[in-house]
Image: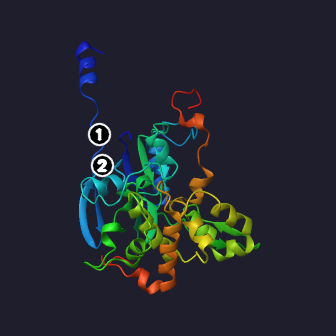
């Protein structure tokens, strides 16, 4: 290797892998984007798409603050690559209300004072939407267990469970109402 | 996360070819493979954020037709590699015939993670040891 080769090697790193085109349906609106492969769904939502309702807590899938619904199923957006969601339907906290009419879970969280600082709340609510759709929670203990992927450092847990229970009691029809038109 | 290339496999053969052409696949212990498979990503992406796993390329196998849970002639079940933990744990046949498996799955992680994580990824999950997550230790 000549000195020139060595210099060019050190000053010209290989070009990073190219962006990948993806089409996502986010809160009912189709978005065509080009994203770097290492972009998480969370960073795409909060960055380029300016949907900052979805929160970054631990960024390691442990706290649940980033919970969103993909094809109606709750997941941790921090552990999902945006490129792997191509063609899918994403619902974030911004897509739950129907105009000015709050989603039943949003209203229930207010009714039961189910938050203090509010940082975990978007994830809690999206997670609860997914929980009710899954249909496996029959008792308050089930709700607590199946909401255990959402941490609340303010300790609003009893009120969160009460809010989720209220909506479960109202029946599934009210829960799947979705202003973004993205429920399945 | 370090930059990497991404390709979505259209078939099982295609996924194998992608791994082979990248020169990976022979040493499953390496933390910096030329190419690695991704489906649920819950373990791999976490390790990539921690800079423990450093694949140059990810081959997405999540959409391959490997998610079925099928009855076998001997009365057993075949659990698809890309079936999620949640789908597996709540499958009525798994609940009825393999209740310990169902309950074991539901005792782990969270609902969100179980909705993402796959059976194949579970079997290939890296060690949970704290030292493995520490890139300054010799074990990775």
Q: Position of residue B102 (x, y in %)?
A: 68, 66
Quadrant showing the C terminus of chain B: top right
Real-space Cα separation, disc 2 to disc 1, in angstroms: 9 Å
Chain containing mark 1:
A
Which residue occupies 73% across, 69% down? B99
Q: Which mark is residue A36?
A: 2
Q: Is residue B126 above or below residue B11?
A: above
Which residue occupies 52% across, 75% down? A134
Q: Is residue B68 visible?
A: no
> Which of the two residues, B27 or A70, is positioned nearer the viewer here?
A70
Which residue occupies 28% across, 23% down? A9
**Res A72 → quadrant:** bottom left
Q: Are marks 2 and 1 in contact (CB under 8 Å)?
A: yes
Q: Is residue A153 above or below residue A17?
A: below
Q: Please tell me whether mark 1 sits on a helix, a strand or a loop.
A: loop
Q: Position of residue B94 (x, y in %)?
A: 68, 71
Single out the residue that lies furthest toward the right.
B74
**Res B88 → quadrant:** bottom right
Q: Which mark is residue B50?
A: none
Which mark lies nearer to you, 2 or 1? 2
């Amino acid at each position: 290797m000549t000195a020139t080769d060595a210099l060019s090697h050190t000053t010209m790193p290989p070009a990073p892998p190219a962006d990948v085109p993806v089409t996502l349906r986010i809160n009912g609106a189709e978005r065509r984007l080009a994203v770097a492969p290492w972009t998480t769904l969370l960073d795409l939502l909060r960055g380029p798409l300016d949907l900052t309702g979805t929160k970054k807590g631990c960024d390691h899938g442990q706290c649940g603050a980033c919970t969103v619904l993909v094809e109606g199923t709750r997941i941790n957006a921090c552990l999902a690559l945006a490129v792997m969601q191509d063609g899918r339907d994403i619902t974030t906290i911004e897509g739950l209300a129907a105009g000015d009419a709050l989603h039943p879970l949003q209203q229930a969280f207010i009714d039961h004072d189910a938050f203090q600082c509010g940082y975990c709340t978007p994830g809690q609510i999206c997670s609860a939407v997914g929980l009710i759709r899954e249909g496996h929670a029959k008792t308050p203990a089930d709700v607590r267990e199946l909401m255990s992927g959402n941490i609340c450092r303010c300790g609003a847990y009893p009120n969160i469970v009460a809010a989720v229970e209220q909506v479960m009691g109202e029946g599934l029809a009210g829960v799947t109402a979705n202003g973004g038109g993205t429920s399945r | 996360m370090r930059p990497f290339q991404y390709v979505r496999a259209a078939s099982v053969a295609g996924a194998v070819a992608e791994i082979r052409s990248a020169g990976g696949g022979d040493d499953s212990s390496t933390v910096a493979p030329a190419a690695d498979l991704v489906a649920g990503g819950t373990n791999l992406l976490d390790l990539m954020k921690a800079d423990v796993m450093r694949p140059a390329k990810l081959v997405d196998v999540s959409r391959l037709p490997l998610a079925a849970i099928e009855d076998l002639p001997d009365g057993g079940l075949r659990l698809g590699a890309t079936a999620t933990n949640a789908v597996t744990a709540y499958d009525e046949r798994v609940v009825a015939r393999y209740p310990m498996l169902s309950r074991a799955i539901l005792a782990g992680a969270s609902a969100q993670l179980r909705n993402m994580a796959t059976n194949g990824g579970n079997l290939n999950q890296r060690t949970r040891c704290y030292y493995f997550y520490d890139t300054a230790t010799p074990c990775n």
